[in-house]
Image (cartoon, grey):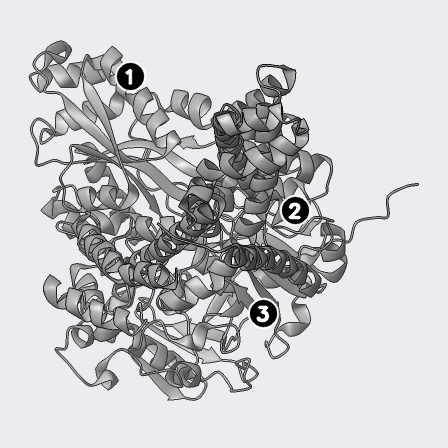
Amino acid sequence: MLGFSRNDMKKLIALVALLIIGGLVLFGVGHTNSTKEGYSLTLQEANKNKILLLTVGSEPRTLDPQQAQGVTEHHIIMAMIEGLVAPSIDDQSKAVPGMADHWEHNDDYSVWTFHIGENRKWSNGDPVTAEDFVFSYKRMLTASFGAQYSENLFILKGAEDYYRGKITDFEQVGVKALDDHTLRIELVGPTPYLLSLVQHDSWLPVNPKAVLSFGKIDTRDSKWTSAENFVANGPFKMKSWRPNDVIEVVRNPLYWDAGNVKLNGINFYSIENSNTGERAFQAGQLHKTDQVPLDKVPYYRRRHPDLIRIDPYEGVYFYRINVARKPLDNPKVRLALNLAVDRDAIVKNILREDQRPATGYTPPGMGDYQPLNKIAYDPERARQLLAEAGYPHGKGFPKFTIHFNTVESHRAIAEAIQQMWKEELNIDVSLENQEWKVYLDTQNSKNYDLSRSGWIGDFMDPVTFLSMWTTGNGNNNTNWGNPKFDAFIEQAARTGDPQARLDILHRAEDLFLSEPPVVLVYWYTNAYLLEPSVQNWNPLVLGNHNYKYIDLKAEREPAK
Amino acid sequence: MIKVIVGRLLQLIPVLGIILTLTFFMSKVVPGGPFSAERQATPEVIAKLNAYYGLDRPLWEQYLTYLGNVVRFNFGPSYTYQSESVNEVIARAFPISLQIGTLAFCIALIIGVTAGVVAAANKNKLWDYFPMSLSMLGICLPTFVLGPILALVFGLVLKLAPVSGWYGLNYVPFHPMIMPAVTLGLFYAAYIARLTRGGMLDILSQDFIRTARAKGVPDHEILLKHALRGGLLPVVAFLGPAFAGLISGSFVVEKVFNVPGLGQEFIKSVFNRDYPLILGTVAFFGTLIVLFNLVSDIVQALLDPKSRK
C-alpha cells in the first residue's frame, strides 16, 4: 500500500486544486479568445453581411476534388473549384460558362473543343490554362494515385489503356491543350451529356503548382487542401477549416465573374445529426439544413410550410436481389415480389416526404428521358406469377432474408414490405440489419438474398443509372446479367443522335425491368429547412447549386 | 511512494503493448475495409489504395511496422481525415474534450458529493428521498435524452446557450462547452451521489463516530470532519476511471451538441475502419485510464488513515 506523510498530502491537495483552477482558467481563455468573426454571426448579422450559413451533413473527408467521393465533399468543393462549365441557376440540364467561355462539338458529340476564357485565374494569380486540365486528367488517370472515380474518365480516348499501363505516353490520351486557351477532348464514342459530366468532381481541375508543391502527381492526402494552401478558381476561396465544426469560404476577388457573386462568404457546418441540425436552424444558427428529421416533417408541413422545402432528387431506393439464389433466379418470382409492394402506402405512411413510388428504375427529371411506368402495385397478378413459378399461395416458398444497414427508416420500410409479402403472397421473410461497413462487405461479396440499396445519379443522363447493370459491373452485385442489355448499353454509347440514343436506353431499361434483379421502392426527394431570406435556392434534381447566384435578403427591421 | 508511482508507470508499457496488439488484430478481423463505399471503386482501385497505405503486405509485417512507428510516437495517417495524421487529429480534438470533461468533472463532484452527504445526514427522511430519487432519475436518463432536453430549454427557449457548434459562438451568453459539460456532469453526479451516500452511511455506523458523538462533537463536525474522509473512499475509486472517461469525450454528447471532440473520433474511427485512428485513440484512452487509476489510488491512500504509516 502507498504510504504518505501529512506533508505529502498537503502538497498533493495543493496540486489537485491547482489542476482544477488551471482547468477553469483554460475555459476562460477559450471563451475570451473567440473574436467576432464570420462563424459567430447571428442570422440577422449574417444576412446583413451576406454570409450564408448552411450544413452539408458529415465532415468532408477531403477537399481534393480528385479524391472526393461523396455529395458532402462535392457541395463544398463546388464553391471553390469551377469546372469547364458550371450549373445554371434553375435548370440542371443546362450548363453556363465556367472556365470555358464557349465550346463546340462535332456532329456526333465525340470531339469537343473548350475555349478557356482569357480572364480565368486561380486564386494564387496564375492564369487557368488548358494545360491545367490536361494535368488534372493525367492525375486522375495515374493508377498509383488511386482515384476512386478514375473510371469516369475512361470515356476519353486511350484513357483506360493509359490507366492500365498499356500505353505510357499521356500524349496518346484524348485530351490536348492546343494552346493555353484551347482544350480538345476526344471521346471513345458520342457523349451528348458531356457538359453535365464535366461538372462532376472527377472532371474538375486542380492547380498543378499547388498539388506539386506538396508531393508528386500521385501523392494522396497532401497538405495542398488545407486552408492556407488551397488554390481555388471558383467564386469562393477557403478561409478556415475546423474539422467537425465549420469550413469558411470567402469571396474570391480573382474569380472571373466576381462582379456577379452575391454572397461575401459561406460557412459550411458539419452537423451529422439531423436533430441537432434542426435545433441549430431553430436557434438561428443556420440558413439551411441538409435534411429534416423524419418525425418532424409533418410538424413543419403543418405549422411552417414556409420553412420546409421538398425538392425532387435524382435517386432511387430499391432492394438488390441475388439472382444466383433459388427461387430468386426465376424472373417471375422477382416480378411477383415487385408487384406485391404497395409503394404508395410506404411513401404516404412511413416516409412522408413526397417521395414518388418508383414505377421504373431511372427517376424522372433526367432531361428528355421519360421514366418508365412498368412496375405498379398489382397483387392479383403477383399471385398469378408466383403460381406460374410453382408456388401457388406461396406454398413451398423458402424463407429468405432482407438485409439492410442499421437505420430506423430502413427497418420500417423492410417491415412494411415483409408484411405486404406475407399478406399478398404468403411468403415468409426475415430481416437482418448490419453495421454499415459489414453491410457493404456482405453486399459486395453477394452474400445475401435481398439487400437494401440506393443509387444517386452523378450527372443528367440515364446512363448514370443504367450502366451499372451491365454484366459483371462492379456496382451490379446481383449476379444478374443479360447480353441483350449489355448490347443496348453499348449501342447507346455508339449512337450520336440524342433522341435515338435515349430510345435505346429506354429499351434497355424496359428489358431490365421485365426480369428485374431489384425490388423497386421509391424515387428520392430532398427535404430540408430553408430560411426565407435565402434567394435563388431553386429546386435542382442533382442538388448542385452554383453558389454565385445565391443571395441573402436582409430582413426588414421589425415593427416597433 | 515515488518507487510505487514509477513502478506503476512502467506497467503502462506492457499494458499498452497488449492493448495495441489486441486492437490491431481485432480491427483487421472485423469485416469491411476503410475504402469500401456504397458506390464501389473497382477492385483495381481498392488494390492500389491498399498498396498505397501498405495494407497489401502480410499482417505480421504490417504489425511490426506499426509497432516500430508507435515507438517513435508516429501513429500514421488517418484514412478518414485525408490530410491529417492521427497525432494531429488527437491534438486538435483532445483539448476540446479535456475542457468539457474537466468542467463536467467539477460539476459531477460538487453536485454529487453534496447530494450524497445531505442524503446520508438525513437518512430515510425527505432530504434523503428527494436527492436520491433525482439521482435515480439521473442514472436512468441517458445523455441522449438529457442533452436534447437541455438544448431545447437553454438553447431554444431561454436562448442562453448555442445548440450546436464550438468555435466562437459568442452571441449567446454561455460558452459552447457549458451545455455538454452539464449534460455529462449531471449523469456522473447521479452515480457519485449514490456512492457518497453509501460510503457515508457505512462510516457513520462505525464505533469511532459513536465515540465522537458521545464526546459531544457537533453533528456537522462529525459529518464533514470525521465521516466525509472515509465516506469518500468508494467515490475516489470511481473517480479515476470516470475522469479518464470524461476527458476522452463522449460520442453521444458530442453528436447532440455537435462538438468536435475526441469522443466522436474514437467511435467514428471504428465505423470507418480507420485502422490508424482506431489504434491511436485506443492507445491514448488506455494511457489515460492507467494514469488516472494511479491518481485515484494515490488519493485513496491519502484519505484512508489505515493505509498511512
Kindly report which numbered mark, 2 or 3, lies closer to the viewer in this rendering. Answer: 2
A478 relative to A9, above or below: above
Q: Position of residue A518 (x, y in %)?
A: 22, 35
Kindly report which numbered mark, 2 or 1, lies closer to the viewer in this rendering. Answer: 2
Please name the residue that numbered disc 2 is placed on: B162
Nearer to us in this view, B260 or A525: B260
Amino acid type, label 3: Phe
A68 relative to A412, above or below: below
Q: Position of residue A127 (x, y in %)?
A: 51, 86
B163 relative to B22, above or below: above
B296 relative to B86, above or below: above
Residue at figure coordinates x 29%, y 32% from the top left: A520
Q: Position of residue A268 (x, y in %)?
A: 56, 57
Task: Please tell me whether mark 1 sits on a helix, a strand or a loop.
Answer: helix
Q: Find residue A420 and name its label.
A: 1
Amino acid type, label 2: Pro
Please name the residue that numbered disc 3 is placed on: A236
